[in-house]
Image: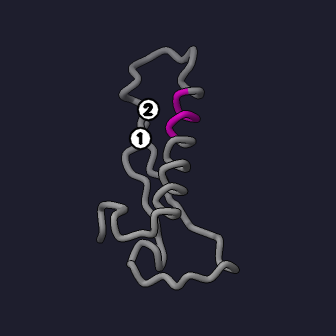
Amino acid sequence: MKTGLDHLPKAKQHELQTISTILRDTLEDFLQGKTGRRTEYRILKIILFGSHAKGTWVNDPRMVISVITIFWWW
């Protein structure tokens, strides 16, 4: 399993970085006004599945769907 984004095209790296930022910002917004330890709410992993994750993608403009699974810890 690849753990970085270096194997992906720059555009896909940027797209995934944007998605990651949105998810983290959404979590921060959710935590506003919440009581308790912030460490109880954190994103453990963001996993990309499919051909981009395996490094076997084919550039096809018709294929724009990426599947991301998020593991939340609380």
Quadrant (top left/top right/bottom left/bottom right) for the N terminus: bottom left
Q: Which residue is mark 1?
A: 73
What kind of element bears circle 2? loop
Work out whether 27 lies above or below 11: above
Label 2: few (<14), some or many (≥20) within 10 Å? some
The image's colouring method is one colour
Quadrant (top left/top right/bottom left/bottom right) for the C terminus: top left
Task: Say whether residue 32 is left or right of residue 38.
Answer: right
Q: Which residue is mark 2?
A: 41
Asked whether the residues under the numbered discs 1 and 2 touch, taking CB atoms below 8 Å apart as contact, a structural biologist would say yes
Q: Residue drawn 46% across and 59% down? A: 13
Name the spot of residue 65 as percent of width and height, x first: 63, 70
Q: Residue drawn 50% across and 38% down? A: 24
Task: Say whether residue 5 is left or right of residue 65.
Answer: left
Name the spot of residue 39 as percent of width and height, x first: 36, 28
Q: Amino acid at mark 1?
A: Trp
50 and 61: which one is in front? 61
Task: Look at the image and say whether residue 35 sits in the magenta stretch.
Answer: no
Quadrant in the picture for residue 40: top left
